[in-house]
Amino acid sequence: MTALPRSFHYFLWTRLAGNTANQMLLVALGWQMYDLTGSAWNLGLAGLYQFLPAIVLTIPAGQLVDRVDRRKVLGAGLALLLAAAVVLALGTYQGWISATDIFALCFVLGTARALQAPAQQAIVPQIVSSAQLPRALALSTAMIKMSTIGGPAVGGFLYAAGPSIAYAVCVALCVVSIAFVFAIRRAHHATSKGPVTFATLLAGFAYIGRHRVILGAISLDLFAVVLGGVTALLPMYAKDVLQTGPWGLGLLRAAAALGGLLMAFALARRPLERRVGRWMFGAVAVYGAAIFAFAFSHAFVLSFALLFVSGAADMVSVVIRQSLVQLETPDEMRGRVSAVNGTFIQASNQLGEFRAGALAAVIGPVGSVIAGALGTLAVVAIWTRLFPMLVHRDRLTTR
């Protein structure tokens, strides 16, 4: 197993520091908004102001990623994150920050996410070889899982010591992340030529539509997450089904992330090399089965274990999908295809939470989880018929 290049290690530190800062910022920002307004509605609006620019701007950002140095696009996203953290730190320390200011900064954070998402995906194939890509993507995803687990906890602890302290640490992490971005060796990539048109802007959608392996991989993940996601219902399960308190909810939320983290390290150590299509469909089926069993569990330990399994299975699918998308896409298109992929991921997470909550309001949380899990398993069965070339895919690369 060949060693990954130094530039990739710089990229890993960029992801770890940048996403930790983002997670800490979101926790601190949410607490501060509630302290200022005492309004659950305003908490929802804060999320909406982040979601809308991320969804609207990610596709144009993909066009930008295909035309300029990808390090600069990623650095610009981190610079916006840094700017938001600086304003929050100063405004909180000096006492002038308001709910309106936070709403405006939420829009900045959404814009930063739109720039970061396609750049982070498209830059990895530039700095590692095709053979190293699955291992590299597993490690990259592990960094995200680590920061997603640790960032909120650290952010909450620092906020208790003082909101301005939490934001100051975010500022420091953003500076570290930006420094590592520009330590990455600049790699040549085939840039998109010609004028920017509506057709070139939407070229990522057109490319995915013509390539059924990519279409099948992305759409399988999209529908599995929309139907099988249970995160929105965990507070109801923790309180009403498992009879536990906030500590139990925290552990349940961490279970899937912990399973994904450990699986990511396992895949980095032993990447999948054969029968990747069957592994992908099998992983999504295991994910659906674990969620189905979770619906019937009344034991906390069993519920935690099932969510852990669902997170591990989902990680197998994620690494295979991301590898296929990057390896099947020419370099001059990677930004736009990554932007479409990132948009689908964001939309599936939001729609999945809405689907789970809306259905739970009608048939209860258990019924909502059962219906979603059965829907996920049905998607696996249907997709094996619609995309046989994906099922029978042996290796990640055909070259």
Image (tube, rainbow, N blue to C red):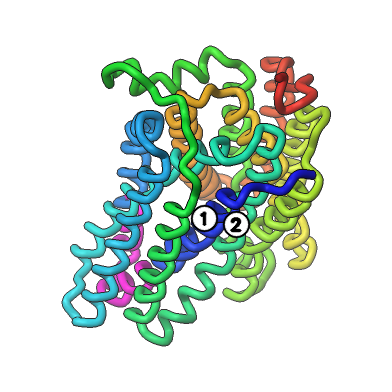
Q: Dot 2 lies on which element?
A: helix
Tag 1: amino acid: Arg
Q: Which residue is mark 2?
A: 143
Query: Magenta stretch: residue 30 in it?
Result: yes
Q: Quadrant of residue 39?
A: bottom left
Q: Is residue 35 left or right of residue 134?
A: left
The one of 394 and 347 positioned closer to us in this rendering: 394
- Residue 351 seen in this snapshot: no
Q: Which stretch appears magenta?
A: 27-48
- Residue 105 seen in this snapshot: yes
The one of 218 and 290 positioned closer to us in this rendering: 218
Query: Which residue is at 50% across, 69% downward?
Result: 152
Tag 2: amino acid: Met
Judge whether 231 appears above or below 210 on screen. Answer: below
Q: Is mark 1 in CB contact (under 8 Å) with mark 2?
A: yes
Question: Where residue 326 sits in the image (x, y, percent)?
Answer: 58, 30
Judge whether 218 appears above or below 171 on screen. Answer: above
The numbered disc on residue 15 is: 1
Query: Magenta stretch: residue 309 in it?
Result: no
